[in-house]
Amino acid sequence: MKDLRLVFSTGRASSAETATKAIEKHLAERRKDPEQFAGIRTVFTCDRTGGLELRIGVRAAWSLSYNVKSGAKWIKRRYVLGYYPALSVADARTQANALKNDIAQGIDPSQAKKEIADQRQKAIDEACTVTELFNQWICSPTMTSRKLGTDEPTRMMKKDVLPVIGKLVVKSVTPRHLASINNRVAERGNRTANILMALIRQMMGYALDQGIIEALPRFPSKLEENAPCDRVLSVPELVELFDKLPSAKLINTTELAIKIQLATACRIGELLRAKWTDVCLDAGEWVIPAENSKNGDPIKIFLSQYAQGLFKQLFDLRADAEYIVSNVTGDGAIDQKAVTKQVRDRQRGVQIAGRTKLFDTLILSGGTWTPHDLRRTAASSMQSLQINPYIIERCLNHRPDKITATYIPQDPELDMYEAWEAWGQVLAVADSAQGAELADLYEANAKQPITRRKRLTELMRQLKGNVVLLRKEA
């Protein structure tokens, strides 16, 4: 930016008035023809007060240029006094002269200003409570850029952390405070406690980066989590589930969401974030975009005839909604935990105040289950249908290993379509009047010796009256 230097005098009151008129005249010229002054900064220099300047660009700022000695060298600095017209010509000159007296006595106004600001910030940091820190951290770019949003971290912190230590000054948080929170939450599950401690650690790390604390407090050791769940619903349990769903009195969209997750093997969160713009019912396709998938990889799901029927039922319920599974009012997405909570409430086994009275309607013969177990059930059942494990992995949108990705870069779409369609046919039978017959056939087959036992594919053929034996019976 080029500087246009002009000189004015503030030696007498009349001179200050004259200088003000000159400044106003120049400002009017800049407003009248901004293109003429594009890229030009006007600098008014005072001939009576050395170093005092009015620098006019986007704003009109008063500044004082001066030199200070640092060791054997002299350093030139500029101190901003304020902005015109809030700070008049006469007042700017008065402030500049006062600062020049301080400079003559060895006081650096810029350094003094910085020290005052540091002291003020230090006082603020020392008085910063955990609640105030949380409000800063949850709005920081690190948190607002989270793919899954900040709703769940906010819920967990407001439930288990802020009521306990929210009023404490951040610097006064001790390992005992953290251990107390950890022990209390661990009663509900070690994994929940570990997740909460990770959130607190991240928040305290933010405080460390911002200079609010000088060191992190010692956190409790990570608790041992339960072994990964391997719950898979058998075919008879699927029939049982379909029979029990109506009596559970779930919201219509929730019941359909459960069936769609089974039919597509998607993650429940991917379904609850899906929009109708992601679905083409005519083509029988649902695309999960990268921003909705857990691993950040998009996937095209080819809907079986059974799954298409479920999507059409959802469309008929909320044709004007943006999201496939919308909230009660239809103007937004349903809460990400809503389906899981509704399913869990109907498997508690005991009545809890404020919760549904149907507390055991979805407990199956094999025990309790979660929505994610349905995804595992779909994958396991596809294997029983003699579908290639690699195809199952692609239907689950799992990333292939490096070598496989190198030599098979494209998704085997036809094989994936056939996998979803074959699985959809099983669900269509299980979710029909023939479900009981399929369950009986499956249980009778499970009692057979291994040499006489049939795969699910053969059972489906037998049920349809088209028996094709793949091996000779003894």
Image: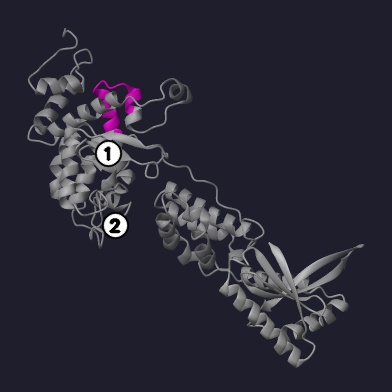
Dot 2 lies on which element? loop
Counting from the top left corner in percent of width and height, residue 40 is at 66, 66
Q: Residue 286 — which label? A: 1
Height in image: 12 above or below 185? Answer: below
Q: Amino acid at mark 1?
A: Trp
Which quarter of the rendered picture does the N terminus lie within?
Answer: bottom right
Where residue 259 sits, quadrant-wise, is top left
Going by the numbered disc 2, the residue's amino acid type is: Gly
Q: Which residue is mark 2?
A: 332
Mark 1 or 2, nearer chain start? 1
Q: Residue furthest right?
A: 72
Magenta segment range? 376-392
Q: Taking the image as drawn, is residue 368 in sight?
A: no
Q: Which mark is residue 427?
A: none
Residue 425 is drawn in which quadrant?
top left
Residue at the (45%, 26%) spot, across then down? 401
Q: Please, what secondary structure does the residue beneath circle 1 have?
A: strand
| Magenta: main secondary structure | helix
- Can you give x and y, in whole percent of width and height, for residue 413 in the image? 30, 27
Residue 333 in view of the camera: yes
Residue 385 shown in magenta: yes
Looking at the picture, does residue 462 appear above or below residue 39? above
Badge 1: how crowded within 10 Å, few (<14), some, or many (20+)? many
Q: How far apart are labels 1 and 2 at the CA level?
A: 19 Å
